[in-house]
Image (cartoon, rainbow, N blue to C red):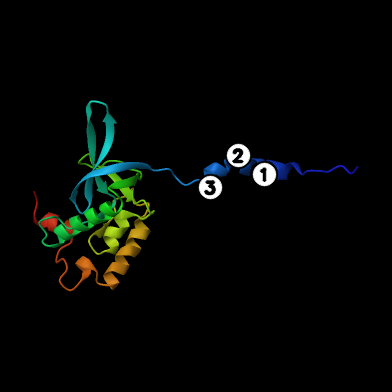
Amino acid sequence: MQQRYYNPIVLIVFTLLFVLSPLIVEPQKLERFRVTEVHDGDTVSIRVSSFVGIPFKTERVRLIGIDAPELKQEPWGRHAKRHLKKLLSENDWVVSVEFDLDRRDKYNRLLAYLWGKDGSLLNEQMISAGLATLYTVPPNVKYGDRLWRAQKIAQQHKRGIWGKSGLRLTPEQWRHANPR
């Protein structure tokens, strides 16, 4: 009977691949939350806890990487809010939440990317529809290139705020001209 020789390096590599494969292949598991309110085109509230007999706790979430027109920037603020509601409705008001490096902004809102049940990035969909502008604040730039490309396409196709009767001022410019 012939004896088989196994290369120890090959055995080590296969063992490591077997042991580490769940870490390599498995995508990041994101927690899912119910959206309870849409404040505007880039801010929502999500339900974060529920205890028997204790009311649900909610948290405000600011969508990372986008800046939607302010509600007073008529009619675009209303359009952006309505479109975000439509996207959430298509997802049964449940989203997966992904954080970047900074988890909160100076207003104590959570900062997050919202993912739909079909794997679509809602932040990106708002930009693609021409109802939000790219707004990156380092260090939260994980999908900056992806959002930038979405904005370029929206501009080329003159969607929403990029159209003929679009915004005169970006949301950021409008806030500077109209402080609270």
Given residues 42 and 138, the one toward you in this image is: 42
What residue is shown with label 3?
25
**Circle 2 — which element?**
helix
Task: Please tell me whether residue 96 is drawn above or below residue 153 in the rendered image.
Answer: above
Residue 173 visible in rendering: no
Q: Which amino acid does label 3 sit on?
A: Val
Q: Which quadrant of the figure contains the N terminus?
A: top right
* Disc 2 from disc 1: Cα separation: 9 Å
Q: Which residue is drawn at 17% across and 68% down?
A: 166
What residue is shown with label 1?
14
Which badge, 3 or 2, comes first in the chain's sequence?
Answer: 2
* Disc 1 from disc 3: Cα separation: 15 Å
Which badge, 2 or 1, comes first in the chain's sequence?
Answer: 1
Q: Residue at x 24, y 69 (%)?
A: 159
Q: What residue type is labelled 2?
A: Val
Q: Which amino acid does label 1 sit on?
A: Phe
User: On the rendered structure, is 6 left or right of 36?
Assistant: right
Q: Can you give x and y, in whole percent of width and height, for residue 106 in the image?
A: 22, 41
What residue is shown with label 2?
19
User: On the rendered structure, is 177 left or right of 117?
Assistant: left
Q: Can you give x and y, in whole percent of width and height, for residue 42 in the image?
A: 22, 52
Given residues 161 and 102, the one toward you in this image is: 161
Which badge, 1 or 3, comes first in the chain's sequence?
Answer: 1
* Disc 3 from disc 2: Cα separation: 11 Å
Q: Can you give x and y, in whole percent of width and height, for residue 39 in the image?
A: 17, 48
Q: Which residue is drawn at 19% across and 57% down?
A: 82
